[in-house]
Image: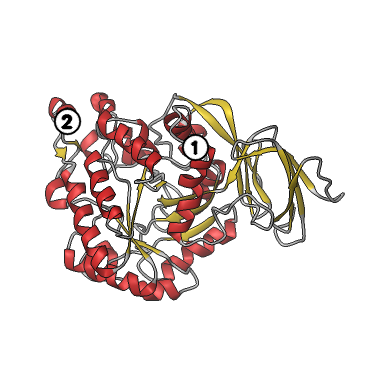
Amino acid sequence: MSRDSMSSLLITNARPYGEDPVDVLVTDGVVTSIGTGLDAPSDADTLDAGGAVLLPGFVDLHVHLREPGGEESETIETGSHAAALGGFTAVFAMPNTDPVADSAVVVEHVRRRGEEIGLVDVHPVGAVTVGLGGERLAEMGTMAASRAQVRLFSDDGRCVNDPLIMRRALEYASSLGVVIAQHAEDHRLTGGAQAHEGAVASRLGLSGWPASAEETIVARDCALARDAKAALHVCHISSARTIDVLRTAKAAGVRVSAEVTPHHLLLTDGRLTGYDPVNKVNPPLRTAEDTRAMREALAEGVIDVVATDHAPHAAQYKDTEWSAAKPGMLGLQTALSVLVETMVEPGLLDWHGVARVLSERPAEIGGLPDQGRPIAEGEPATFALVDPDAQWTVRGAALASRAANTPYEGMRLPGSVVATILRGRITVRDGKVQA
């Protein structure tokens, strides 16, 4: 089916949000009819959903595609393949590339490469400070006004530690109508840290990353965002104490949103006992109490979204001793399955809830009016089809990313994405990317 020609698609036997099976007729990328026994034009493509759950396409506010400069670990092309296979139709690519995405030239390159590949909408995240140095604001206005239309800014991987710089960034963001996404880590408390500060780190002789290093930055930034009347997004929260700060700030009317990663929903610092660097991540895996709190806060809505923090690393950066290994884990192709295991199967979220945290709220936070839309007539046909009964075994070498650093190696996980549709065009069918 040509990307540019007029086209029709008939999806049969699909269950929107897990409800009763229907057919969905799509014309020129827009849903034109939903019902049973629908007829389609003779030249229409057809997709038998086989009773799979139909959801709005997933939106990831936090991925690392490594291009430019880190292509040995991932490229926009390989990352786009992984995203589409994971049910994602839009991703936000973090700016810690080489060169850093702190100018219109770099963000426009990222946006253009995503469009050329065409599997998912790739939205570049602009740096808050020049070179991620934390000392001087980047040209946020220029990036926002560029062809890339940057709407999310972050120094992810590094915290904007200086409160005056952060205040100015939030004030600037407020005037531009964009969002600052903060990597909440007071580096003065985490120098040399290798693991969550607690019993496991003490037993293993690893220097600790205290939860207070996250909590204090979030509290500070919520106050700054309140005064600036700005939108603040907190990246990959990991501490139960941070949830209390968020709950209080939201109740006071602060425009703050937050994300949790799949690995912070499922994994704990108990995995560190073998010193396998695949489990090294920033922020670190924390305790079972923290993991339980993340799940409850996500169900409650205090945590707004799931974002993968997809962080591929080539073997030379991971297959080394713990202290030298770079932090990060793959996440795009396993996100849905981890969410099914941690939230759907225990009854914490239904499929409407999955759509909320993987599609609707991420699109709203990221300023994407054509993503995360309801499954209804007149809406864009941008979908993920999920088989909730599937079981699959994760193998890093079989994933689409250039790297293989998955913490779920050998795990049997529930649920799988069987098809992904971007504005009426099938990008993944039967678990395979469509050229």
Q: Nearer the viewer, mark 2 or mark 1?
A: 1
* Identity, as a three-letter code, of the amino acid under mark 2: Ala
Q: Residue at x 38, y 73 (%)?
A: 176
Badge number at residue 201 = 2
Return the x and y of residue 262 as percentages of the image width and height: 39, 38
Instruction: Name the residue located 17 percent from the left edge and 64 percent from the top edge.
Output: 163
> Would you call the spot at circle 1 few (<14 residues within 10 Å), some (14-19), or many (20 or more)?
many
Estimate the x, y position of residue 38 in percent, counting from the top left. 81, 44
Q: Which residue is mark 1?
A: 336
Question: SS class of the residue under badge 2?
Answer: helix
Q: Is residue 154 above or below residue 308?
A: below
Whole-number angstrom distance, CA of label 2 to CA of label 1: 30 Å
Q: Are marks 2 and 1 in contact (CB under 8 Å)?
A: no
In the picture, measured across the screen, residue 320 lies left or right of residue 23, that is left
Q: Is residue 26 left or right of residue 270?
A: right
Name the residue: 28% across, 65% down.
131
Instruction: Identify whether 324 is placed above or below 30.
Output: above
Q: Of residues 117 and 303, which is closer to you in this image?
A: 303
**Relative depth, front residue between 48 and 320:** 48
Q: Quick check: 284 left or right of 93?
A: left
Residue 170, picture quadrant: bottom left
Q: Looking at the rendered structure, which numbered label has been put on residue 19?
A: none
Residue 346: x and y, percent?
44, 27
Instruction: Identify the coloring.
Output: secondary structure
Res. 226 image quadrant: bottom left
**Residue kind at label 1, given as amino acid type:** Leu
Query: Which mark sits nearer the N-terminus, 2 or 1?
Result: 2
The residue depicted at 39 percent of the width and 70 percent of the height is 177
Q: Residues within 10 Å of mark 2 (few under 14, many from 20)?
A: many
